Image (tube, rainbow, N blue to C red):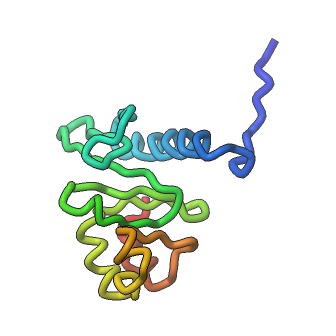
Amino acid sequence: MGLNLKRVKYDSLNSRQKENFNFLKLSAILADYGYMTMRLSDDWQGADFIAQHVTDGNFLKIQLKSRLAFGKKYRGKDIYIAFRSDKDWYLFPHDQTLVRVLKKTGIGKTASWSKRGGYSFPKLPKQVAIILKRYKI
């Protein structure tokens, strides 16, 4: 008797299931680049998970987001942000990318950034997509 596997519809998942789904999808992509991942039970230094390279031992602290987001709480922590936009995945260094995005957009003047300490984009804007092009995986 064979397995009766059926693909799950992402939109039918709840928020916790989507987070788990995204972690596993991204882990599979990172494995293609030699990174093994380890999920953290509680954010460690702002990271949801760690990715370590199999040959050089380099490790990345990664915060997984459902969309492009920046946060003041991630500054100075050597955090990488990972998110999916349509079918594309991005993995970028938070701090150096934030500097470029603040220069190219008006997010630094928003109440979300100045009062709440974070900003997320519902959709990936073209001017920011240009900045993130090099971080598409």
Question: Which residue lies at the image location 54% right of the left edge and 39% below the top edge?
Answer: 20
Residue 87: horizontal and vertical position, in percent? Answer: 59, 60
Q: Which is nearer the eye, 88 or 81?
A: 81
Q: Residue furthest front?
A: 115
- 37 up-or-down from 82: above or below: above
- 20 up-or-down from 78: above or below: above
Residue 38 found in image quarter: top left
Residue 75 found in image quarter: bottom left
Residue 12: horizontal and vertical position, in percent? Answer: 74, 46
Question: Which residue lies at the image location 40% right of the left edge and 88% below the top edge?
Answer: 106
Residue 97: horizontal and vertical position, in percent? Answer: 30, 72
User: On the rendered structure, is 47 left or right of 82?
Assistant: left
Quarter that holds the N terminus: top right
Residue 48 found in image quarter: top left
Question: Which residue lies at the image location 44% right of the left edge and 41% below the top edge?
Answer: 27
Q: Which is nearer the eye, 29 or 123?
A: 123
- 70 up-or-down from 100: above or below: above
Residue 15: horizontal and vertical position, in percent? Answer: 61, 46
Question: Which residue lies at the image location 29% right of the left edge and 80% below the top edge?
Answer: 100
